[in-house]
Image: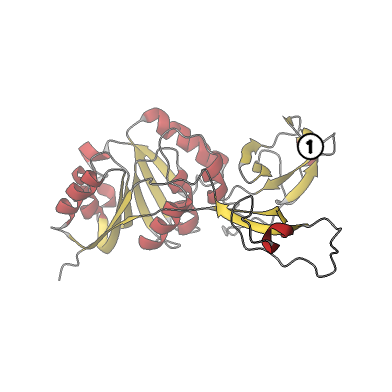
Amino acid sequence: MLLMDSSKKISFNRCIREGDLVIVYEKHDTMKAVKVCENSVLQNRFGVFKHLDWIGKPFGSKVFSNKGGFVYLLAPTPELWTLVLSHMTQILYIADIGFVVMYLEVVPGCLVLESGTGSGSLTTSFARAVAPTGHVYTFDFHEQRAASAREDFEGTGISNLVTVGVRDIQGEGFPDEFSGLADSVFLDLPQPWLAIPSARNMLKQDGTLCSFSPCIEQVQRSCETLRSDFTDIRTFEILLRTYEVREWKMDHSKFEDGSSIAGPPCKRRQPSSEASVGDDTSFPAVVARPSAETRGHTGYLTFARRKCVS
């Protein structure tokens, strides 16, 4: 995911090598993660693609199949990884992730504690944000999920930035070794208020905490617990609305007689003045409308800052 060169700086400039993980892009809603193996092939509706042809090409390359079809080979950024990873649990998507990284003030060199790991969607973005000198310690009580996430982090190249632990943070709290060292703490737990006292002890003074909860009742109880040791408590709900922009054939004659247009409303271009009465009166127009698959509510994000002790 974060392709690291010898100087430990993030780079996507190098070429694809044997064993690399690439995102095979067919179209915006059809992508998959593929590990490059010299003797393997990828088969899809566009034909057969030999992995051997990919080795040595830069990320972003357009490669062709035996039938002339093509796909793009993209670097596995956190944004793309979020779209292709296997969902072991409900994951955070890009809108929530971007907001969390910003409000937790995660920057290079930070030490971030996370519970629970789940599918690792957010963890990968934390890893990129803290690179090259910071570190993310993420915990999940489910041993199989933790092992699967650890394997994914190895495959995406961020294992040097992420440590995965198996621990019941609600019942046991975070390990004492992180006491007073964490810049940020993220909680994705059924009962986050049980882990808030431990999170408070882990944070540096003025450190930030975020709790993700799908239900407002969880938010209310968490906020009650936060009031004793935290300040600047805020809760947000991030709603993302995507649009489809495409070309649509419009019948100009319908505009002239004042009748309505068949098709969705749009901002239309003016037809050419050179068109004669006998010509085809249809012309292309750009149509923008909300996507039918727009995701609604995912959860509530509650942020707080540890109070400074004078």
Quadrant placement of the C terminus? bottom left
Type of amino acid at the residue the image marks with label 1: Leu
Residue 192 image offset from top left, x and y in percent: 24, 44
In the displayed structure, does residue 36 sit left or right of residue 237? right
Residue 49 image offset from top left, x and y in percent: 78, 35
Q: Is residue 287 above or below residue 215?
A: below
- Farthest residue toward the left? 228
- Farthest residue toward the front? 257
Q: Is residue 242 above or below residue 42?
A: below
What residue is rendered at 48% in x and 53% in y?
241
Residue 56 visible within the image: no
Which element type, helix, strand or loop, lies under badge 1?
Answer: helix
Of 300 and 108, nearer the camera is: 300
In the displayed structure, does residue 191 sit left or right of residue 246? left
Q: Is residue 169 above or below residue 309?
A: above
What residue is rendered at 26% in x and 57% in y?
203
In the displayed structure, does residue 208 sit left or right of residue 248? left
Of 185 and 134, nearer the camera is: 185
What residue is rendered at 28% in x and 62% in y?
207
Residue 227 visible within the image: yes
Q: Could you tell me how many numbered marks the image carries?
A: 1
Residue 219 image offset from top left, x and y in percent: 23, 49
Displayed quadrant of residue 143: top left
Of 77 and 52, nearer the camera is: 77
Residue 52 image offset from top left, x and y in percent: 79, 37
Of 251 and 298, nearer the camera is: 251
**Residue under label 1:** 52
Displayed quadrant of residue 90: top left
Neighbor class of circle 1 (other Cα within 10 Å; few <14, some 14-19, many 20+) is: some
